[in-house]
Image (cartoon, rainbow, N blue to C red):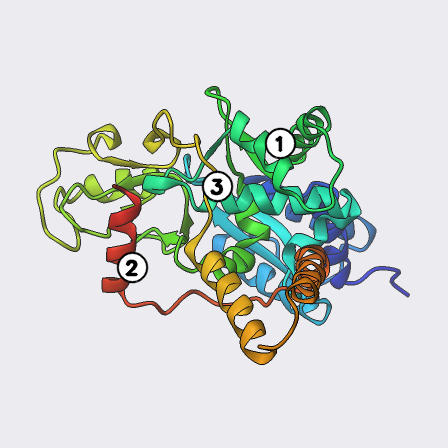
Amino acid sequence: MSTVNAKDVQRLFLQAVLSRGVLSGKLAQALWAKAKDAVMAVDNNLDISHSGTREEWEAFVIKVNQALDPLDLEFRHLQEETTGREMYAIVNRKGDEVAQMATDYTPTEIAFFKALVDQIMSAPRESFSLSSLAALREVSVLKKSNMTKTQAEVVLSSFVAKGWLQKSKRGRYSLSTRALLELQPYLKSTFPDEVIECVICFEIMTKGIACTGPNCQVRMHYHCFTKYTARNRKCPTCNCDWPGNDPHTMTPVGESAARDGDDGRRRIRKSVENSDDEEEEDEQADEPSQPRTQQSRKNKTKAAQTQSMDVDEDESEGEESDTPAKTQGTRRSSRRG
């Protein structure tokens, strides 16, 4: 009786992927081929397709995701923003995706990471990056935290080393491929007004180009821009002429859009400010006769509960915002100002 079967290919493949985290499509397919060879070496009579075509690979990925589905996991892929390389990772589809960092980081360190993501996503002119000094400043706004600046520097280095953040030669932090892969639902649900998508591949975008036309909302990854302009030199939306296929002639999206002084003051998203104001107003309306000292004590308790929820509460996996393009246009034009 055979000791292996065709499903062992999936098992071997998943073990190899889990040990590597984020990996390129080329490496993923090489691991798939090795897994098939290993199983066939034990029993070459098994009926395992071995052509290695793209169609066969895509069919294999579907089967892998069917096996992962009961565990609320997904073998997800996207194109690396700068090079266009296809990247894969097994990601958690349930609850707060940031919570999967809990195996490596403390609640305070996760709260620090969330604060960094908030500042990166709310960066002006769609620069989606944060200076080193501004990153360290986030330690001071963490509630009930005794993390020092020195400790924060170590944690920041760990975020980069483990692939959650990227650090450029200019010393600016941005979201990595791993973060975009694993935190995509979290980003879309938490930052619906800040997330932008490439009009070519429709994937989330934090690096690339913007159309130079006034109020045009066309955004493209660098690799998508190169492919598009190889056959067309006009904007697909506003139809304005583009100077060529050099991305440097276009309005930048990402770190290149950052200017000196952008990180001089800490950014607070309007949605967060409005939410806090509404909660305070509702509380005062419910108990108008409450003494001021008692009201202040209640507000402090509520603030502590909110801080705790930032780390422990499950975030909903919202889908992409359905905000009309016109509304997004107004918002993005103001961010680029």
Q: Position of residue 304 (x, y in %)?
A: 71, 57
Label located before the other in sequence (1 or 2): 1
Vertical placement of 49 versus 244: above or below? Answer: below
Q: How many marks?
A: 3
Label located before the other in sequence (2 or 3): 3
Q: Position of residue 50 (x, y in %)?
A: 61, 53
The quadrant where residue 213 appears: top left
Report the amino acid beneath label 2: Gln
User: Label 1 belongs to which residue?
Assistant: 160
Quarter placement of the N terminus: bottom right
Q: Nearer the viewer, residue 152 or 314?
A: 152
Depth-wise, is mark 1 or mark 2 nearer the camera? 2
Report the amino acid beneath label 3: Ile
Residue 163 seen in the figure:
no
Residue 321 seen in the figure:
yes
The quadrant where residue 199 appears: bottom left
Q: CA distance from mark 2 to mark 3?
A: 18 Å
Name the residue at 38% across, 27% down.
261
User: Label 3 belongs to which residue?
Assistant: 120
Name the residue at 65% across, 53% down.
98
Name the residue at 66% across, 43% down.
142
User: Label 2 belongs to which residue?
Assistant: 328
Label located before the other in sequence (1 or 3): 3
